[in-house]
């Protein structure tokens, strides 16, 4: 089984789950959708390993720092392309 990625938004109201994705490549797009609505929030990506039943924080973003999110997105896409080439 592969990892499951949960994305949380932290705002003045607390921590809210904004979505769950099965592919890491899909995570930045979901965050970008929410940043457009609320750039003052912080976003946290948590990877869940169902086999080990454990969570780990993969990345955190401030909504106003879109450049960091885009750099992370490029990094993920580059890794995916390398994996596809190896297969």
Image (cartoon, rainbow, N blue to C red):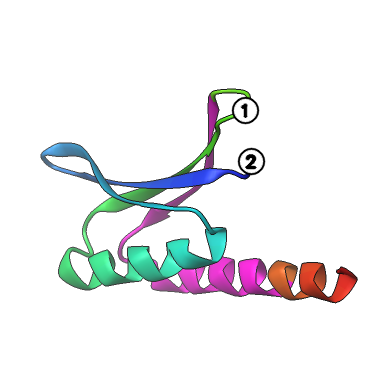
Relative side of 13 to 63, left or right: left
Decide which of tag 1 and tag 2 comes sooner along the chain.
Answer: 2
Relative side of 67 to 74, left or right: left
Residue 83 quadrant: bottom right
- Expressed as whole percent of the image width and height from the top left, the position of residue 12 reads 13, 42
Going by the picture, which residue comes out furthest to the right? 86
- Expressed as whole percent of the image width and height from the top left, the position of residue 63 reads 31, 61
Q: CA distance from mark 1 to mark 2?
A: 7 Å
Relative side of 82 to 17, left or right: right
Seen at 11% across and 39% down, the residue is 13
Q: Which residue is mark 1?
A: 51
Q: Which residue is mark 2?
A: 1
Relative side of 47 to 42, left or right: right
- Expressed as whole percent of the image width and height from the top left, the position of residue 16 reads 22, 42
**Residue 47 drawn above or below residue 72:** above
**Does 56 appear in magenta?**
yes
Seen at 45% across and 61% down, the residue is 27
**Residue 54 drawn above or below residue 60:** above
Dot 1 and dot 2 residues touching (CB under 8 Å): yes
Magenta residue span: 54-78
Tell me if mark 1 has few (under 14), some (14-19) or many (20+) residues whose alpha carbon lies within 10 angstroms of its own: few
**Does 62 appear in magenta?**
yes
In the image, which disc is placed on residue 9? none
């Amino acid at each position: 089984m592969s990892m499951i990625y949960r994305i949380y938004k932290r705002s003045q109201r607390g921590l809210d789950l904004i979505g769950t994705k099965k592919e890491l490549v899909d995570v930045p797009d979901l965050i970008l959708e929410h940043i457009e609505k609320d750039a003052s929030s912080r976003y946290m990506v948590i990877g869940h390993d169902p086999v080990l039943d454990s969570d780990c924080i993969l990345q955190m973003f401030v909504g106003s720092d879109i450049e960091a999110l885009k750099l992370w997105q490029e990094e993920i896409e580059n890794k995916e392309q390398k994996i596809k080439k190896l297969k």
